[in-house]
Image (spheres, helix red, strand yellow):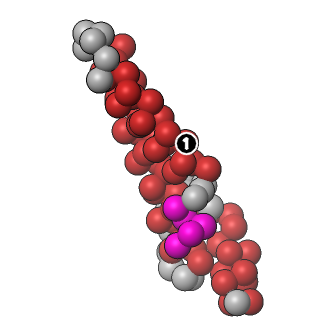
């Protein structure tokens, strides 16, 4: 679980969210650029979580989508898990 929570993609998404929250607490008005920043953060977070889910499924020898970033590494991830 630790490997999933401290992955660089997930940490980047969380720190980006913290930065957006700090900016939202200021007295700046909510503009279309702010809305796009929040939308971008949401997409980044969804992709990071999807990558974690795909990695977990690949390590458990379950099927993952062909467009997954870990699609070609299924055998290696399974071998690493079986070594433990």
| Residue shown at 41% from the left, 48% from the top | 46
Asked if one can make out residue 26 in the rendered structure from this viewpoint, the answer is yes
SS for dot 1: helix
| Residue shown at 56% from the left, 69% from the top | 2
Question: How many neighbours does mark 1 have within 10 angstroms: few (below 14), some (14-19), or many (20 or more)?
Answer: some
Q: Where is residue 3 in the image (x, y as percent from the top left)?
A: 60, 67
Q: Quadrant of residue 83?
A: bottom right
Q: Where is residue 65 in the image (x, y as percent from the top left)?
A: 49, 63
Residue 78 against residue 19 in the figure, above or below = below
Return the residue nearer the eye: 11 or 47. Answer: 11
Residue 6 against residue 30 in the figure, above or below = below
Asked if one can make out residue 32 in the rendered structure from this viewpoint, the answer is no
Q: Position of residue 35 (x, y in %)?
A: 30, 21
Q: Where is residue 56 in the image (x, y as percent from the top left)?
A: 53, 72
| Residue shown at 68% from the left, 75% from the top | 77
Residue 45 against residue 40 in the figure, above or below = below
* Range shown magenta: 1-5
| 43 displayed left or right of 67 | left
| Residue shown at 62% from the left, 61% from the top | 70
């Amino acid at each position: 679980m630790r490997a999933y929570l401290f992955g660089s993609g997930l940490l980047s998404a969380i720190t980006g969210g913290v930065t957006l929250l700090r900016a939202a607490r200021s007295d700046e008005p909510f503009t279309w650029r702010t809305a796009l920043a929040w939308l971008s953060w949401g997409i980044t977070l969804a992709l990071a979580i999807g990558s974690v889910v795909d990695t977990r499924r690949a390590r458990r020898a379950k099927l993952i989508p062909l467009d997954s970033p870990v699609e070609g590494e299924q055998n290696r991830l399974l071998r690493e898990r079986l070594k433990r």
